[in-house]
Image: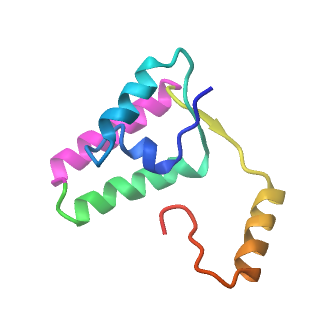
Amino acid sequence: MPYLDTAYLVRLYLPDPGWEIVRAFVQASSEVPAACIHARAEVVAALHRALREGRTDAAQFSTLLDQFEQDCAEAKFKWLPISDGVIAGLSAVFLRSAVAARSAES
């Protein structure tokens, strides 16, 4: 099953660099792509950021958001859960890290 992180999911909706490759990859797969459930909210945030930055206008944003929500309702993605253990481990990494670390869509 192909796995898409938030950046790849967004490229299914916005023509960000590399979008053609991501769309071709998803179309070539016979399986529904998977993503962690937090990406569902992050995609909406990324689409909204495109609106704020002027890369889309209000009408385009609404259309993109409607399409994403329709794709979710039609189960075009397999949303994977995140356990409390994964979140606790991630938090521990940030607390111990001496280098700059990023969470998704930071």
Q: At 54% from the left edge and 61% from the top edge, which residue is drawn?
A: 104
In the rendered image, residue 27, in percent from the top left (x then y), is placed at 41, 21
In the rendered image, residue 9, in percent from the top left (x then y), is placed at 44, 42
Quadrant housing residue 49: bottom left
Quadrant housing residue 77: top right
Q: Is residue 83 left or right of residue 68?
A: right
In the rendered image, residue 88, in percent from the top left (x then y), is placed at 80, 66
Q: At 17% from the left edge and 62% from the top edge, which residue is drawn?
A: 54
Q: Is residue 67 magenta?
A: yes
**Image quadrant for the N terminus?**
top right
Asked which colour scheme the image uses, the reply is rainbow
| Dominant SS type (magenta) | helix
Using the image, determine if residue 36 lies above or below residue 52: above
Depth check: 45 or 12 in front? 12
Q: Does the magenta stretch include residue 61?
A: yes
Q: At 48% from the left edge and 33% from the top edge, which residue is drawn?
A: 72
Q: At 28% from the left edge and 44% from the top edge, which residue is drawn?
A: 14
Quadrant housing residue 95: bottom right
Using the image, determine if residue 48 lies above or below residue 71: below
In the rendered image, residue 33, in percent from the top left (x then y), is placed at 55, 29
Using the image, determine if residue 96 lies above or below residue 45: below
> Where does the magenta region start and end?
56-75
